Image (cartoon, rainbow, N blue to C red):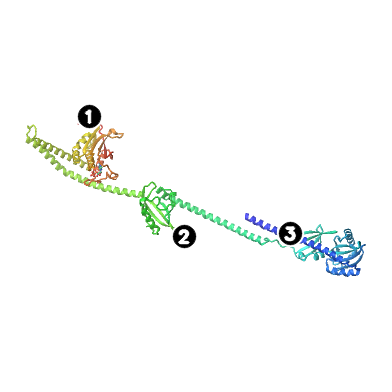
Amino acid sequence: MLVTALLGMLVWLAGRYEISQVQGALERDTIDAVSDIRGALTRNVQSLQSLYAGNPAPKSWTVDAATLLHEHREWVRLEWRDAGLATLAAADTPFRTPVFDLLGRDNARTDVAVACATARRFNGPAYSGSYFVPQSDGLGVEVMELCMPLVTSGRLSGYVVATYSLQGMLSELIGKSYTRSQEVSFTEPDGTRLALHGSVRRGKRVFTAQQLLDLPGNTLVLRMDGWRGAPDLFPNVLTALVTAMSIALVSVLVLLGKDTRRRLKAEHALADALAFRKAMEDSLVTGLRARDRDGRTTYVNPSFCQMVGFSAGELLGRGTPAPYWPPEMAGEYQQRQAIRLAGNAPPREGVESVFMRKDGTRFPVLIIEAPLINVLGKQTGWMSAILDISEQRRIEELSRASQDRLQATARLATMGEMASLLSHELNQPLAAIASYATGSINLLQVAQGEAAPALHPTLADLHMALGRIAEQAERAGKVIKSVHDFVRRRDQARESVPARALLDDILPLVNLQARKLQVRVVTQVDEGLPDALCDRTMVEQVLLNLARNGMQAMDLPGLRERELLLRVRRAASAEGNRWLEFAVIDAGPGISDDVARQLFTPFYTTKTEGMGLGLSLCRTVVEQHGGYLDFAPHPPQGTVFRFTLPAASEPRSRVASLE
Ligand code: ADP
């Protein structure tokens, strides 16, 4: 709109300018024309004076006047009058019928008289007012008198009167160029047109200029009417050019407006599509990452950031090695990337790899990569979809572990069968050993005779050895029975046993091995402890097992402090009254994390001759009693294995416990 307004104003101003130019030219023309007329009139006065050179006679004057009239078409009549205004001689223009024929010259007497009176007063040429002289053809002529006093030797001798035709003045005294395209006229001050010359082509617009022609005795108004055709819309080339350019500008603006609207629409559509895509990317659980051909990260989605724990700002623009590459694998990854950048497409099903979170933890990922192609069909990089497969791995691991456990259980079951078979088979030889031992003792006693107060020392030793054999055979039988029961999962026979008694039972066997391994065995049982409620044989087996493990752990060359402590006290829990804690403490090298992780796994052992069943069995036994078994390092050196057993509700009497 602004441009249109400007354009309109420009055209209007240009038009105005053009008009003022035309008007100015016309005004100049009018001034020129007036000065033309004035000049011509002055010259005419001189011509008239020349008639009187050499005191002419009226006759010769007439001849001269006729010649002069021939040259001056603006005059219609010349007269020589005496001082009383009587006509001495007169000549009419040869170019038309004498003007005063119809009305007679007398009719104009007053005008002549006025002019001459003025002339006499001014002592120079003077003009009369113009007046109309009707002609015989029905038209008429507007004329004006010029009266010039003739002075001979300082005395007025007469007048020369020249009658001007106003029309003739216009056609003769003004340059032809003015009248060619303009209408020139004399008007009275009120606008009445007196005489007219030049053709007027009536256009839409007429320009008018007026100029006063001030003559002594008369004032005429010269009016010029310029004519112009329909005013041009584009008055000149410059305006036309500017207009054309403005139109072009407006068209460009219109086109631009249209284009902008289209663009806006496209932008909206694009923004919608982008928002859709973003929502899609943000909702993905798959990590997305784009890299350019130099390996710099150009895009990551929120899921990927979450996966690796780095913010998008920390990842974007980063080249290799990427912050999520584990440093120890950076070299390998770099190679892999070089292969990729060389244009070798990775397998479609993806590559498994390991990434590192910001906190340094590693996690397995599956990377599926595809080339990133731009609009021009050129590859600009790689787009990767990254799946965190740690959960998948964990499940796989779990199922593998459970499979292992299943196998172990199967082996255990077989073992159980074997143990059951063995115990059955061993029972009889053990019973036989016990019988033979008892029989031998009996025989010894018979051979000594009832009366013999004491045995021979050797025989006494033999008697004792046989007693021990019988005892151990019986014990072995019990162990076998317990194992049998355990394998059969029969409810163990729980009995109330003093803690000290449990230790005492195993001490002979422990000491046997301790002596061999040069270990000092120390027991420590708190005072006033309640009895333990347990399957005596199995718990003794547990203690024996732990003691044996501890001693074996201390079987290291160069180990000076070899002490095994067997300790019993109340459990340090809130329910301490109802639980006893047994601890087997060695001064061995301790248990490494690696071993600790698999300690209770059946068949796990670090010993060449070990079975790897001891600890897992121990735990099973303790857990069957409702207790727990654990271990911990025992500073400054060694390990403590602890397990709890339920206490019998009634503590035994102090005396009994001392037994
Ligand atoms: P085994 O004694 O037949 O090897 P266990 O289940 O009793 O089977 O023990 C498993 C493993 O635990 C042993 O091989 C040993 O490496 C480790 N271990 C057990 N007790 C101790 C201990 N007190 N000190 C160091 N290591 C031990």
Tell me which image quadrant ligand 1 sits in: top left
Residue 491 shows up from this direction: no
**For residue 654, which numbered disc appears in the image?**
1
Residue 157, x across and y down, in percent: 92, 63
- Tags 3 and 1 touching, CB below 8 Å: no
The residue to which callout 2 is attached is: 376
Which residue lies under the disc numbered 3?
A: 24
Between label 1 and label 2, give the one nearer the viewer: 2
Q: Nearer the viewer, mark 3 or mark 2?
A: 3
Residue at the spot 46% in from the left edge and 51% down from the top edge: 278
Q: What x and y, as percent, mark residue 534? A: 23, 36
Asked if disc 1 and disc 2 are in contact, CB closer than 8 Å, the reply is no
Q: Secondary structure at mark 2?
A: loop
Report if the CB atoms under discs 3 and 2 are less than 8 Å apart: no
Instruction: Assign the C terminus to one quadrant of the image.
Output: top left
**Is 279 placed left or right of 208 in the picture?**
left
Q: Amino acid under label 3?
A: Gly
